[in-house]
Image (cartoon, rainbow, N blue to C red):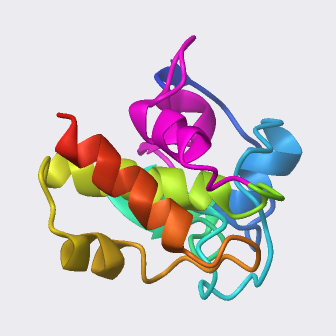
Amino acid sequence: MTVNGEARVCDVKGSESLLSALRDYLRLTGSKGACEQGECGSCSVLLDGELVCSCLVMAADAEGSEIVTIEGLGGPELHPVQKALVDSGAVQCGYCTPGFVVAAAALLEENPAPSSDEMREALAGNICRCTGYGAILRGLETLVAGR
């Protein structure tokens, strides 16, 4: 598979998730495992350009795919979504942040000027227990307005 633009080989057991492969074998620990049921969004990655919960994808099924994790989004600089969330005070414990950033980046790639309702819909698969979502949405709205 190609992970963040680099060809990677990962010898996993047949029952292991993509999340496990990323974290345990490739040491890409930005994606978090919380619910392990695809309900919280903390493990979100892009798989062949589609937003997925990596805890629900079998690692073996990702063979030959292109995966982008939170580590692959920004390069040496913060991704604009990361900067927007930091600037709006939307980062507290940070556990959910990678999933929100990947989901928001996917949305903005598809729709550079989403409405507030479209942002809420795109982020509905992510759970945050600290910020209460207001700061996250404000940060994204400010980013979109400044484009």
- Check the image and report above or below for 18 versus 132: above
- Check the image and report above or below for 55 versus 39: above
Horizontally, residue 3 falls left or right of residue 121, namely right
Residue 105 spot, x, y in % from top left: 36, 47
Between 53 and 92, the residue placed more toward the observer is 92
Residue 56 in sight in this render: yes
Query: Which residue sits at x=58%, y=73%?
Result: 41
92 inside magenta stretch: no
Between 67 and 40, the residue placed more toward the observer is 40
Horizontally, residue 48 falls left or right of residue 57, namely left
71 inside magenta stretch: yes
Residue 29 spot, x, y in % from top left: 80, 44
Which span is picked out in magenta?
A: 63-91
- Check the image and report above or below for 13 versus 72: below
Look at the image and tell me in which quarter the C terminus lies.
top left
Residue 60 spot, x, y in % from top left: 60, 59
- Check the image and report above or below for 27 versus 7: below
